[in-house]
Amino acid sequence: MARGQRAGVVLVTVAVGFAVAAGAAGHTEDERLGVLVGRYHELELFDGAALVARDGVILLDRGYGLASREFGVPNGGDVRYRLASISKTFTAALVHQLVDEGRLTLDTPLVEILPEYRSDTGARVTIRHLLGHTSGIPDYFRVAGGWAAFAARMDTTRPSKPEFVASLCSGDLEFEPGSRWSYSNCGYFLLGMVIERVTGAPFEQVLRSRVLDPAGMTDSGDEGADPEAVIERLASCYVRTPEGIRRQGYWNMATAFAAGSLYATPRDLLRYDRALTGDTLLSTGAKEAMYTAGPGGYGLGWEIRDRAVGPDGAVRRIATHEGFLFGSHTRIYRVLEDGVLVVLLSNAGDAPLEDMATGLLDLLYGREPALPRSPVSNEIARVLHDGGIDAAVARYREISAKEPQRWDLGERQLNVLGYSLLREGRVEEALTILELNVETYPESGNCHDSLGEALAAAGRTTEAVRAYARSLQLDPTNRNAVERLRHLVGAS
């Protein structure tokens, strides 16, 4: 898939272990929240900032690791972090405000606002479809051929918004609008243009006047408005590689635009949560539309989950959103009925934020959390660096046979390492690691998808087609495999 890293980390519940880690049974709720996140940090699974609050009262507000490794600046609640796709929730809020004002409707066709967009598809795609990822417009990462190909393309070109839309967001629809769900950054890029066209003002200006200022978010903004601007206290982004931690290369945030170019501090996100909870930003009707799950479990701006939490098993509605760009991984969870907020912002690449949030919610609702195991990807990367690929494979097989309880051996682990090697151009080593993952998880569509990407990068088109075809057989919803197969078969 686009990231190739979506499977969750395997966790083990060890109630006694957590009591020991916490130091004493008498630790407060606040302290235990910090200890749990600290455990992930100790295992090199998380660097960044965590904030937990209930009804606006902060229970945890702490940084882990460094915002700048070059200058030794620590992470924390007053550091600004790239939000990546959490930005979509802000874009959605702006659209719902315009709907409330009668300046457009959820069922307004795209071409009514952007008449220059291709009419044969734009007349069928509505604002509702764009908000809910049911437009059928392909995601621009898939159109470009994956994350790495997109980044390389943007490094050599600086397209205007119309040029970007023409080249990456105007392809044939993948399905009839409204009939299915498929995540599309293009949809939210287009919504940003809709906001600008309806208001007659730049996206950043509209965002500030309509959301950031009313919510009191003085430490937040739009990096895409001026990608070369110096932003004080903005965390640097890093990635973990077999060579150790490395700084993430330049990424032109203008290409993210309304789909992912915002930054904020954890404390500003608490202010955002409070503003959304009250009536500062949106009407009751707008929030009902935003928080009602549609196809794919996605509302009109948030991912919506009805989940049993707490010892009584009562179901609460959770509004959540993830964000991911290389070097930046973010998650926000809002338990709507209880006023609970969990913010996790990583500036050191991919992190098991879903599992971390689940553990924090367990603590808040009186359950013993699951604890993380040591990530096998770090160990295999160390052996690869010191002894080469054969030694790395041998160590993995040894761990699998003799030490499975000590290590996290989930499919995500080797995928993370494989993609890291692929980004560095170490294609043959990446292939070996991803083939090992397919051997370990032969029924995982995601693993076959990731192997297909590496095979394509190696120029082994026939084998890549087979890998993607197998991925699609195992996971018929994998739109990335469909698009890659179409591209590879057409090119062969």
Image (cartoon, rainbow, N blue to C red):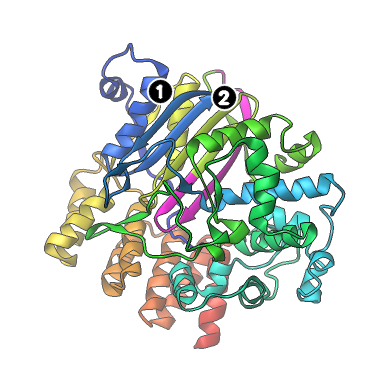
Residue 209 at x, y percent in the picture:
69, 46
**Residue at 17% of width from left, 52% of height from top?**
398
Q: Indicate yes or no whether the magenta region holds residue 323.
A: yes
- Quarter of the figure with residue 353: top left
Q: Indicate yes or no whether the magenta region holds residue 215.
A: no
Check disc 2 and report its element: helix, strand or loop: loop
Circles 1 and 2: CB atoms closer than 8 Å: no
Residue ID for mark 2: 56
Tell me which label, 1 or 2, sits earlier in the chain. Answer: 2
Residue 440 at x, y percent in the picture:
33, 57
Mark 1 burial class by Cα count in 10 Å: few <14, some 14-19, many 20+: some
Q: Nearer the viewer, mark 1 or mark 2?
A: 2
Left/right of residue 260 with respect to residue 181 in the rendered view: left
Check disc 1 and report its element: helix, strand or loop: loop
Q: Which residues are magenta?
A: 312-330
Left/right of residue 383 with respect to residue 85 in the rendered view: left
Is 213 above or below relative to 362? below
Question: Which label sits on residue 368?
Answer: 1
Mark 2 burial class by Cα count in 10 Å: few <14, some 14-19, many 20+: some
**Residue at 35% of width from left, 50% of height from top?**
348
Left/right of residue 295 with respect to residue 38 in the rendered view: right
